[in-house]
Amino acid sequence: MKFCSNCAQPVAVRVPDGDHLPRYVCDACGMVHYQNPKLVVGCVPEADDGRILLCKRAIEPRLGYWTVPAGFMENGETTQDGARRESWEEALARVEISSLLAVVHVLHADQVHVMFRARLLDGQFGVGAESLEVKLCSEAEIPWADIAFRSVDFALRRYLEDRGHGVEQHHFTTIDFRKPQEHHR
Ligand SMILES: [Zn+2]
């Protein structure tokens, strides 16, 4: 950030009075521009026959790799709303969101990924604008080597493990690809 989005004057980076971290501060209008993690919401949609809906990404990052429906949460929606919306946008799939599956802290990307279990409602799906291909995969057909993101890999593996044990737990993990010197920026 170089300029204040409130008054268009240059911003400085410093620790504001009473704070404990460096922030983008505008000395012209006094606004402090906080930067906080973004939420990514998604789900693992399961069809009635137990297969899982996967989408091949048509956009960067990780174009051409496989994911479950997921994307940035919008203002004014719940995490479940967001996961349902992403299923429609990426896979033209109507889903019923069920239990919480995973919360993944992606520290290097300043993101938190929240993943739910879901049921594909009518067996119908298609190729949304952000996808190259959408398909149902049995457990044996999941393209593990071509999964787009670690968080999706984590969610799929926990999903299948839990399903195999007949339980629906929620799982937390942290992914951190930052270089050591970046940890205390
Ligand atoms: Zn300003």
Image (cartoon, helix red, strand yellow):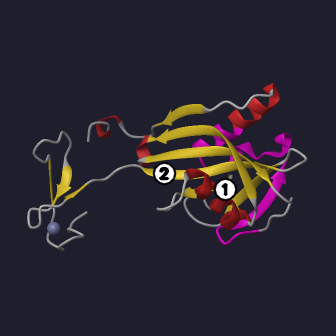
- Of the four image quadrants, the one with ligand 1 is bottom left
Q: Is residue 152 magenta?
A: yes
Location of mark 2 (residue): 39
Mark 1 surroundings: few (<14), some (14-19) or many (≥20) residues within 10 A? many
Above or below 36: residue 6: below
Assign the N terminus to one quadrant of the image: bottom left
Q: Is mark 1 within 8 Å of ligand 1?
A: no
Between residues 26 and 179, which one lies in front from this camera angle?
A: 26
Where does residue 26 sit, x and y in percent of width and height? Answer: 14, 62
User: Going by the picture, which residue comes out furthest to the top?
Assistant: 165
- Residue with the most extreme right position: 49
The residue located at (59%, 66%) in the rendering is 59
Image coords of residue 12 (percent x, y):
14, 58
Q: Which residue is mark 1?
A: 69
Q: Residue at x 55, y 59 (%)?
A: 61
140 horizontally vs 179: left or right: right
> Which labelled disc corresponds to residue 158?
none
Query: Badge 2 local density, few (<14 within 10 Å), some, or many (20+)?
Result: some
Q: Quadrant of residue 5?
A: bottom left
